[in-house]
Image (spheres, grey):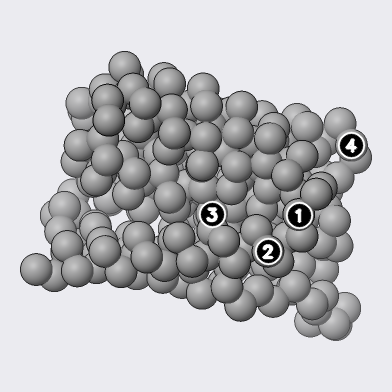
Amino acid sequence: MSTLILALTAGAVVGLALGGLGGGGSVLAVPALIYLLGFTPAAATTAGLLIVIATSLTGLVAHAGEGRVRWRTGGLFAAAGIVPAAVAGALSARIPSGVLTAAFAGLAVVAAVRMLRPRTGPAPQDAVSAGRAARAGAGLGAVTGFLGVGGGFLAVPTLVTVVAVPMSEAVGTSLLVITVNSTAALVTRLATPTALDWAVIAPFTATAVLGAWDGRRLAAKVSTAALQRIFGAALLAVAVFMLVDAVV
């Protein structure tokens, strides 16, 4: 299969995940770039941020048009993650490829488990505090910067359980958080010279953007739980493969 077809196909899958679930797509993007398209871990995580920013921004506009974004809550949550995302993005360039791959695989396992066993119940109102929201936002920003993922699979349940955002608005709000954190991480990463294959990144991003629109329509027809199980199972298989590859 040609590189172009692989990039187009992988981009479509990533877009479907981000558009339908508000997360999970970026965790699939990095291994696709590494194992299918020959990127190094450092280049893949940087390219992953570019892809996630474009795709998340597209989804954000769509959700905003339907009034399903909590701008103030999402903005405060994202603001707490800007500095951690930038710092972690700079540190990531100094981490050996094997360690970066193993860390990413571990995160992918966490993401897969969350998708297969989602927790979407709202938090009690007395459990919501600015401190908890700030800590959660900072942690998410650090993950985004270090591993080049949007972190939507963490952002959605955190917004629901920590900040008490209704599930109907959590996906759209998570896309705001993802866009801000990913941009902050990308700025610091671009300061470190990394060879990027734009002939692959461009078609990957284009189909991811289109897939995000289709993902929203798919989510309206298929239950979120079913979509999470499908992507969760695929992600778990990818995570196991990456762990084995990092260890062997």
Give left or right: position of 237 versus 196: right
Q: For the residues marked 2 and 3, what is the alpha-carbon distance in whole angstroms?
A: 14 Å
Mark carried by residue 66? 4
Residue 114, how many percent across, how many down? Answer: 57, 72
Q: Return the residue at label 2.
A: 226
Near mark 2 (Cα within 10 A), the count class, few <14, some 14-19 or many ≥20, is: few
Crowding near pointer 3: few (<14 within 10 Å), some, many (20+)? many
Q: CA distance from mark 4 to mark 2?
A: 23 Å
**Real-space CA distance between mark 1 and mark 3, rounded to the nearest whole angstrom:** 17 Å
Residue at the (86%, 45%) spot, across then down: 68
* In contact (CB < 8 Å): disc 4 and disc 1: no
Q: Position of residue 236 (x, y in %)?
A: 42, 67
Residue annotated with mark 3: 24
At mark 4, the secondary structure is loop
- Look at the numbered discs 2 and 1 and tell me whether their residues touch, using CB distance below 8 Å: yes
Q: Say which label, 4 or 2, has the lower sequence index.
A: 4
Judge left or right: residue 157 versus residue 104: right
Q: Nearer the viewer, mark 1 or mark 3?
A: 1
Q: Amino acid at mark 3?
A: Gly
Of 82 and 230, nearer the camera is 230
Residue bearing mark 1: 222
Q: Nearer the viewer, residue 177 or 15?
A: 15
Three-letter code for the amino acid on which mark 4 is drawn:
Glu
